[in-house]
Image: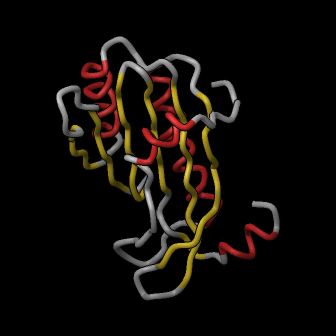
Amino acid sequence: MRVRPAGTATTVILIGAGVLTGCSAPGEATFATGDAKRAVVTVVDDTTAAIGGEWDVYSGPAVEGCTISDGRDGAAYSYITTLRPGGSDPEADVVAVERLWRDRGLTTERYESGGSDPILGVRGVGSAADSLDFLADVRMYSLSGLSACAEGDAVQMQNDGE
């Protein structure tokens, strides 16, 4: 994967449909922040490798605040990548991503945007990541991941350069 920031308006609009916000772990925080970061980076990188192509890092992995189920503040990592142009067969790539995530124990749900030329997508939820979102369109693919919420002070971690 090539690491090159992508920052056009089209990228922001398309990714905006799949940006993941917040973090609320269903149970107590069970990940250390380093483990949470590794988990989301691994699943995102493995997914982009399965699709192939030269993906660009749009954002992250970046620490952000979240809330652990008992109400305490925690830290999670978001990671967003894009592929321009997208693949030639978005439907087949959605199926491949869905299969990969299910094989890893994630729960998946397919969806599509409205309109006459819908953008296809699949969401994933599981222990490797609090949530994942893959959008597939011939113009561009985007993959967003948000780690599980871990114990940690996101503001302090950001101040420390994380």
Which residue is the extreme one toward the bottom? 71
The x, y position of residue 110, in whole percent, is 21, 40
In the picture, the quarter occupied by the C terminus is bottom right
Q: In the rendered view, tell whether residue 114 sits above or below residue 25.
A: above
Q: How many labels were placed on the picture? A: 0
Residue at the (21%, 41%) spot, across then down = 111
Q: Nearer the viewer, residue 39 or 145?
A: 145
Q: Residue at x 58, y 76 (%)?
A: 151
Horizontal side of residue 118 vs 7, given as left or right = left
Query: Who is closer to the viewer here, 13 or 138?
Result: 13
Does 54 appear above or below 133?
above
Q: What residue appears at the point 43 percent right and 20 percent down from the top-left corner?
A: 86
The answer to whether 143 appears left or right of 61 in the picture is: left
Of residues 88 and 14, the one drawn nearer to the viewer in this rendering: 14
- In this rendering, would 160 be left or right of 54? right
Is 96 rendered above or below residue 123? above
Residue 117 placement: quadrant: top left
Quarter assignment of residue 155:
bottom right
Residue lying at 35% horizontally and 25% vertically, measured from the top left: 137
Q: Position of residue 46 (x, y in %)?
A: 50, 32
Residue 10: percent from the left, percent from the top? Answer: 50, 34
Taking the view exactly as shown, the residue that stands out farthest to the top is 88
Residue 38 sits above or below residue 130 on the image: above
